[in-house]
Amino acid sequence: MTTTIDSIRKMDRQDPLSAYRDRFHLPKDVTYLDGNSLGALPTTTAARIQDVVTREWGEDLIRSWNTNDWINAPRRLGDKIARLIGADAGEVISADSTSINVFKALSAATQLNSERSVILSETGNFPTDAYMMEGLAAMSGGRLKAELVERDAVLDSLDDRVAVLLLTHTHYKTGALWDMKTVTAAAQDKGVLVIWDLSHSAGALPVELNACNADFAVGCGYKYLNGGPGAPAFLFAAKRHHTVFPALSGWLGHKAPFAFSDHYEAGDGIDRFQCGTPGILGMAALECGLDLMLEADMADIRSKSMALGDLFIKLVDENLSGFRIVSPRLSEKRGSQVSIAHTDGYAIMQALIERGVIGDFRAPDILRFGFTPLYTRYEDVWRAVSEISDIMQSGAWQDARFAVRSAVT
Ligand SMILES: *Cc1c(COP(=O)(O)O)cnc(C)c1O
């Protein structure tokens, strides 16, 4: 490779975030470039979970809801997430899965804009977002309609039929970013409420929900927030929207859950977006990821993320042929991942994973590489491209075992 490993190691030595890598457990000989799908394990998490299980659950039992403050975990973690996404305390709740939070946000927004019927999103969005739109529309008995238009047509499709626009801030496949401020303003100008899915943005780049006057947002705990597999997700609702009757009106979102009243009365503020009992083990793991993330400077995270992506693109250009760069080349226009396409992408990714370089594959032909500045080194980017180059030159990817599809890609 024309760019030498020595020049790359120098970049690692000058990296202001380099000390964070030791705060994660990372298996030896693995180059992990899939933190955008499942974040790595913080070094504090295992001991914390052990303590929650043996002491808080084992010894303190049900008293822990009060004595170990289990009951406030959704709000406490929500306030920590708020600091990462430009929201105020009391505007974010950590709860449920992203899919369920999409449903909650959609039902709240369509209630606030009840004279309009269309829920709009883009084709090629992450499937769960579109599927939840269809579910809500089906439940509405004809009042609501789910519509998808191509990315380029989104802004022109905002008219007085549209109640809510649901967009993923950083596209899961291409990494392309929407301009949150401009799009939110354009939608609101047409009377449309906006829900931002931050699954690939929270913890990956600065997000300024309130500075953009966002209405609602949702996002994932297990990607860049390093909360562990299936970690609790989150929901943001701007204070001005803490008026709706939540569709998932569960008992823990009630104003006084322990009054056990027969009828629902929405809880104060963001509490109304809670539904049932929080999973405390998952919350404990997520809090470890959040505490670690909050130590780091988001501006440093963003500039390293952009540099990692730029380096990857440069090395692909210099060393690989037959691959197409799918992500925006301009770092300001992409999140913290770079995707490249190749007709034999699936087999190439399997060969790469076997060599310990872990990215992922997204049908039909995309090899996706996520850069997580707290633990990805410039050297990791170099190694990934150097292994792909070797796999292509040697033809190693053509082995029949790499063509066998697994359930999860
Ligand atoms: C990862 C992701 C989700 C995940 O939803 P789950 O309910 O956690 O399975 C949702 N939306 C987007 C855009 C994602 O990237």
Image: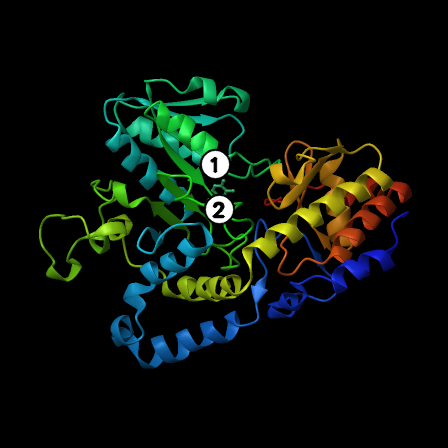
- The amino acid sitting under disc 1 is Met
Could you classify mark 2 by the number of other residues whose Cα lies within 10 Å: few (under 14), some (14-19), or many (20 or more)?
many
Is residue 29 among the parts visible in the rendering? Answer: no
Q: Is mark 2 within 8 Å of ligand 1?
A: no
Task: Estimate the x, y position of residue 46 in percent, counting from the top left.
Answer: 52, 72
Residues at circles 2 and 1 in contact by the CB criterion of under 8 Å: yes
Task: Estimate the x, y position of residue 178 in percent, counting from the top left.
Answer: 53, 34
Q: Residue 303 versus residue 192: which sits nearer the camera? A: 303
Disc count in the image?
2
Q: Earlier in the sequence, mark 2 or mark 1?
A: 1
Q: Residue at x 80, y 61 (%)?
A: 10
Task: Estimate the x, y position of residue 278 in percent, counting from the top left.
Answer: 33, 59
Marks 2 and 1 sit apart, C-alpha to C-alpha, by 9 Å
The residue labelled by disc 1 is: 180
Could you classify mark 1 by the number of other residues whose Cα lies within 10 Å: few (under 14), some (14-19), or many (20 or more)?
many
Q: Would you say 135 lies left or right of 380 here?
A: left
Q: Residue at x 72, y 37 (%)?
A: 340
**Where 105 sits versus 8, above or below?**
above
Is residue 33 among the parts visible in the rendering? Answer: yes
Q: Would you say 214 lies left or right of 299 here?
A: left
Task: Estimate the x, y position of residue 408 in percent, counting from the top left.
Answer: 59, 45
Q: Would you say 171 lies left or right of 256 here?
A: right
- The amino acid sitting under disc 2 is Val
The residue labelled by disc 2 is: 207
SS under mark 2:
loop
Q: Residue at x 21, y 42 (%)?
A: 243
**Where 74 sits versus 340, above or below?**
below
Q: Residue at x 40, y 74 (%)?
A: 52
Disc sitting over residue 156 in the figure: none
